[in-house]
Amino acid sequence: LITPSKENDNTCISAIVNRITTKDISVFAEAGYGKTHFACSLTSNMLNCGKPVLFLTGSTFRNCNDCESKIRSLLHLSEQNTIFDVLDALDFVAEMHHCRLPIIIDGLNETVPYAYRWKEELPPLKRKIIERQNLILVTTCRAKEDYIQLIYGESNYEQIENHVLLPG
């Protein structure tokens, strides 16, 4: 198949090409359906292949000033290093390893009661990552309307661009 149909939207050529070129993926599932397992498996596979990956848990973003400064802090970088510096360095590492480096933030919903901050902070972070040739952002979030509204400002995960639903 060249174009997607309702039955085979993940097996047609255009859907496969779209997934390959996607620079950000938002993974959704109900509680206990494998979001963290998926994120850890992706991380493990990258490391087993000798490729770089950045794995961050959503819960580490609970009590921070902003997500970008928290990423710098988690990487033990000073405030003199901007998020642009961090992403440029990660992009260079990915280029040296001839791969796309996933930046994984597992469990955006686990930042509650501060999850509302993602609505403002996630879009600019995505844009900065998408600007780099070798980076990809992978986030996971519980597919619950309350979380989706709080984090994305949408009522349904299907309204989120580049979403994937794990069936469990």
Image (cartoon, rainbow, N blue to C red):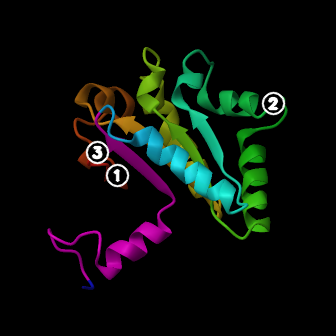
In which image quadrant can residue 154 be found?
top left
Decide which of tag 1 and tag 3 comes sooner along the chain. 1
Q: Give the residue drawn at x 39%, y 36%.
A: 141
Q: Is residue 119 left or right of residue 82?
A: left
Decide which of tag 2 and tag 1 comes sooner along the chain. 2
Label tally? 3
**Distance from label 2 to label 1 (Cα)?**
31 Å
Q: Give the residue drawn at x 40%, y 71%.
A: 18
> For residue 163, which numbered disc appears in the image?
1
| SS of the residue under disc 3 | loop
Q: Which residues are magenta?
A: 3-30
Q: Give the residue drawn at x 63%, y 19%.
A: 65
Q: Quadrant of the C terminus?
A: top left
Percent of width and height locating residue 50: 73, 61
**Distance from label 3 to label 2 (Cα)?**
35 Å
| SS of the residue under disc 2 | loop
> For residue 27: magenta?
yes
Q: Give the residue drawn at x 31%, y 41%.
A: 29
Q: Which residue is mark 2?
A: 76
How would you rate the neighbour count of disc 2 (Cα within 10 Å): few for under 14, some for 14-19, many for 20 or more? Answer: few
Q: Is residue 123 left or right of residue 144?
A: right
Circle nearer the viewer, 3 or 2: 3
Q: Which residue is mark 3?
A: 168
Q: Please say if the residues under marks 3 and 2 sit with CB atoms less than 8 Å apart.
A: no
> For residue 11: magenta?
yes
**Distance from label 1 to label 3 (Cα)?**
15 Å
In the rendered image, the vertical position of residue 50 relative to residue 17, given as above or below: above
Residue found farthest to the front:
48
| SS of the residue under disc 1 | strand
Q: Quadrant of the N terminus?
A: bottom left
In the rendered image, the vertical position of residue 131 relative to residue 125, given as above or below: below
Percent of width and height locating residue 84: 73, 46
